[in-house]
Image (cartoon, rainbow, N blue to C red):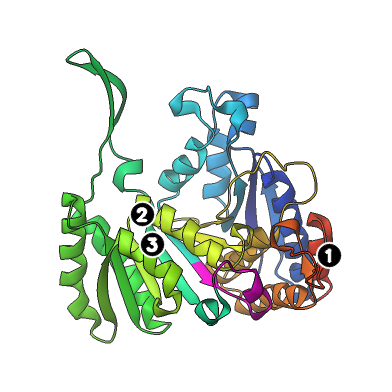
Amino acid sequence: MAYKIAVVPGDGIGQEITQEAVRVLCAVDAKFALGLTYETRDAGGTAYDKYGTPLPEDTLAVCRESDGVLFGAVGGTKWDSAEPALRPERAILGLRKGLGLYANLRPVKVADALIEHSPLKPELVRGVDLVIVRELIGGIYFGEKCESEQVDGTEHAWDMENYSVPEVERIARLAFETARLRRGKVTSVDKANVLATSRLWRRTVTALAPEYADVALDHLYVDNCAMQLAVHPTQFDVIVTGNLFGDILSDEAAVIGGSIGLMPSASIGTGTSLFEPIHGSAPDIAGQGIANPLGTILSAAMLLRYALREEAAADAVEAAVDAALAEGRRTADIYIEGSGCTKVGTTEMTDAVLAHL
């Protein structure tokens, strides 16, 4: 079997962390004889500087032709003055549309070795194991928008939130199916007490639930869900929500585990799937060799599992990450002075993972 992987580093620390993840993929390829090949392409601000667009057609074409996409991160203050349509972040939005990526899966599972790194009390965080299923190509991020208009002599700007029943049904079905493979509970998150789109969301999810009688369903307003993630996170199994709410809640949930740098994600759709850490490009630490590569390495493990169906290889990568953490290796974002752990850089953390493959 041979697989083609598109590697899109992006900006900032994206260059460093994707390089480390590819090192791990090469090692697991050698162990399991997967036949991986790689094509690297630009996106984000890096592509804008070279080609005048954050998502060159060639990048999108290579991604479409690949078996999976390993993505780094895009953005940075360097491009803050770019036109909205040319900002680096348009690259990931364009890839979601171009690849038909309608759902983002963000697992949050706290390793025993990192319980002490969570900002929550150990008794609250021990046993956390949840997945956030976020709708990716609808909602306010892709709705109509106006950057500036004059109304009665005053400047206004607006963004439109829009969801259809088929869009909600599609993401809800994925959430129910995911819950069937886990502990059988879905929590649908909306703001139905205020937003018309959320009322449609809740009606649609509720109407679908009888098809999944073996899965328990409850509903939470987004503000209550944000609170519950902080005070009782173990209650959650699968959380399903829209684009904006999912973006915010997944970052909050990531902190439960001690660092956003640890969290992987999978963007699933009708074509090639894309895998990326949920953190940003962190231009303030780019090039210093201190970025945490584990979120990207674990994203590579998700690529092995969900895109290539190489379960044993994915398990091996995840076990190697757990082993590296268990022996006390820590990048700066998860290092605590006096903890007895060893502070390491980006490459050294990857070396620790490779030692267990």
Q: Which amino acid does label 2 sit on?
A: Phe
Between the C-alphas of marks 1 and 3, the distance is 36 Å
Q: How far from the left and from the top, in percent, is residue 72?
A: 63, 49
> Which secondary structure lies at badge 2?
helix
Horizontal relation, residue 9 to residue 210: left or right: right
The residue identified by callout 1 is 351
Using the numbered discs, state the Cα–Cα distance from disc 1 to disc 2 in whole angstroms: 36 Å
Pick the front one: 59 or 110: 110
Residue placed under numbered mark 2 in the picture: 245
Q: Where, quadrant-wise, is the N terminus in this rendering? A: bottom right
Q: Nearer the observer, disc 1 or disc 2?
A: 2
Left or right: 70, with 161 as reference point? right
How many marks do you count on the picture? 3
- Pointer 1 local density, CA inside 10 Å: few below 14, some 14–19, many at least 20: some
Res. 162 image quadrant: top left
* Magenta stretch bounds: 107-120
Image point 52% across, 23% down: which residue?
82
